[in-house]
Amino acid sequence: MADPVISLVIERTSDLLIQKIVFLKGVRRQVERLQNDLVRMRCFLKDADQRQVEDARIRNWVSEIRAAAYDAEDIIEIFACKVESFTKDKGLVTKLTYYPLKIVNLYKIGKEIESLRMRLKEIADSREEYGIKNLGEGMTTHGEELQRIRRSSPLSEDKDIDRNRHVVSIIGMGGAGKTTLAKKVYNHADVRARFNCRAWVCVSSSYDHKKMLRAIIKQLNEMSKEQLEMLEMMEEEELERRLYQDLQDKCYLVVLDDVWKEEAWDCLARRAFPDVNTSSRVLLTSRNRDVAVHADALSPPHELKTLREEDSWQLFLKKALGHGANGVCPPDLEVVGKKIAGRCAGLPLAITVIGGLLLGKKKLKSEWEKVLNNFSAYLSRSQSEAGAISEAGAILELSYADLPANLKFCFLYLGLFPEDFVISVRKLIHMWVAEGIIQKRDAKNLEETAAYDDVERLCSRNMVQVAEMTVDERIKSCRVHDLLRELAIRKAEDENFFQIHDTRHDEISAKSSLQKLGIWVDDWSDIDILCMHLSEVESLKTLHLYHAAGSGWPSLAGLSKLHHVIELELFGPGLRTLPPDFPPNLSCLSLKHTRLRDDPMPTLEKLGQLSFLKMKYEAYWGPQLVISRHGFHQLKLLELSALRRLDEIEMEKGALPQLQCLRITDCPKLEKLPEELKHISTLDMLELEDMPEDFISRLDADYRGANLRIF
């Protein structure tokens, strides 16, 4: 992952050098030197990235470089934003006033860049201290793979269509049961009787070509010690020739389990497996549909879907209780057991892992409830824990590690969505492009096309599940399996990409993304603790709280601690009544879908700094809004939209003394505007949209001659 992190920082630093050239002229050379340092570091990190999963020393070393890269981006971007804000939309005198401040900041950023360059040099030099040596040894490089593919074989002809040696492919996401099914086929009595010889080899992502060839040859032949020693000394071409000759006249079955790359298939099948008229078969399992199609375009792969609810439950009972088929669950465990099985979302691996964990526990409801409540924690434990859990984690980790660099960022981003959330592909693509995760291109449509290709590639690798297709067979929406979502969140935190916090327990720390924050809350969220932590994030200006339907809002006590927040949005049904306190310096408040039952105006009109109030999409379910004398003495804009039960607005004399714009949309029961509105001297804009005809005609009569711009 180190390579894409550094690549993203380099790309954004390049953008800053282009976009902010006016502001960075004084330190441009230092910025370019820093960028060059990062480029050199990226080249060196490619091998380290492959080994950091297995070596904690490399992982720590890579983490230090990544943190320095992020700091480099932050320093330049913050500086550029500061200077731009000093000079934006200001006159010549103001710009001259701020010129000395710009010089001071140039000097400051120059010093910080030099400090960062020294830090990168120290990190590079510390490689010896970490004991990191011989990076890249033992790895199969992409160049080596290409050489193997290009090397022609004297043993067989290239054929456009293979009708003799069929390839049967089983595809599905990690843990779907591909290997289990392949083993049942491989060991079936009828299959064993049909083929002269059989061999099974696990390919995996970082395969060793010679090792695989030797493994197949050993399974096909009884070999003496001397022959085994000779086999170990053979080079690749000799091994390919030997395997080809062993299979030449036989009806063979070879299973290639867990094939990740098309190159792996090409290296094995095209030179080592004879394609003669013996009705031989190659059984291939893969998470990647593209590999299966590449191996045999004429044989549709068998895709393993997730288990149905009843099948999931029966497998769960078998693994959790140790029963055979059609096991019976103790009545007191059935409800919680079905909840646990449901969390596994039909994935056999997940069911097996959790079932195996429960098998070693007492058959007590309290024990099973602990597992249910800590489901995510059990699946994310380190490999030093129980073997079944580490096996599940290792499979998913391997799936992630094999993703191309740009797809890693795309996959990690999916961890931001809630569990079981159906993700609109169109919206996801826009978010990727907006975040800069997709490489910039000359035209917007090219960006979106590339992004859609990335979605398809993630789906074909079974890292993402297709939820819905369009009529023209394009992916319309998708979802991420819970296990893979947990992996994305964990990896994103490791890479400093993002963090997801449980506000009940976690402390939130933020650098000086953070000015705007959106949070999904549920009825268990402790907003008071959340606000206590957020009060320390002095840069935070905008906070959006979203609540899903189905339960009531949590207590919103604690908002008054957010002295730095000036913009707040509350979104979602079930709020019913407003919180007792708001951020003291709040200037903009949006209420959407909250369905308040009581008139919110008596509370809101007392917010002394409030300048903008928007109540939209059934934010209020009552019939009347009443604004008292001198209420909202700072409010400049009031927007009422889609309040479909509102039939009256009442204003006392002296209310809304600073109001400049009143915007009313889709309030079908509202009969008229309050009389006192005519006497607000500051009001110069009245925006009306999608209102009844009788309301408009009455308004024309009441406000004829008024000095208002009516839209």
Image (cartoon, grey):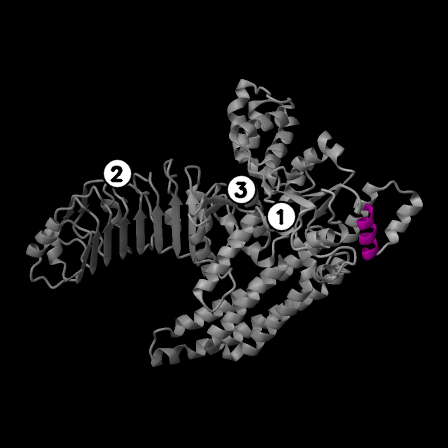
Quadrant position of the N terminus in the picture: bottom right
SS type, badge 1: helix
For residue 509, say whether it is visible.
no
Considering the whole magenta stretch, tell me its main secondary structure: helix
User: Disc 1 marks which amino acid?
Assistant: Ala
The one of 208 and 243 positioned closer to us in this rendering? 243
Q: Which residue is mark 3?
A: 481
Q: Position of residue 30 (x, y in %)?
A: 58, 76
SS type, badge 2: loop
Disc 3 or 1, which lies upstream in sequence? 1
Q: CA distance from mark 2 to mark 1?
A: 58 Å
Disc 2 or 1, which lies upstream in sequence? 1
Q: Residues within 10 Å of mark 3 (few under 14, many from 20)?
A: many
Q: Are marks 2 and 1 in contact (CB under 8 Å)?
A: no
Q: Which residue is mark 2?
A: 597
User: Disc 3 marks which amino acid?
Assistant: His
**In front: mark 3 or mark 2?**
3
Q: Which residue is mark 1?
A: 292
Q: Over which residues does the magenta segment extend?
A: 236-246
**On the rendered structure, is 374 left or right of 55?**
left
Give me the residue at 67% from left, 68% from top. 121
Q: Indicate yes or no whether the magenta region holds residue 315.
A: no
Q: CA distance from mark 3 to mark 1?
A: 22 Å
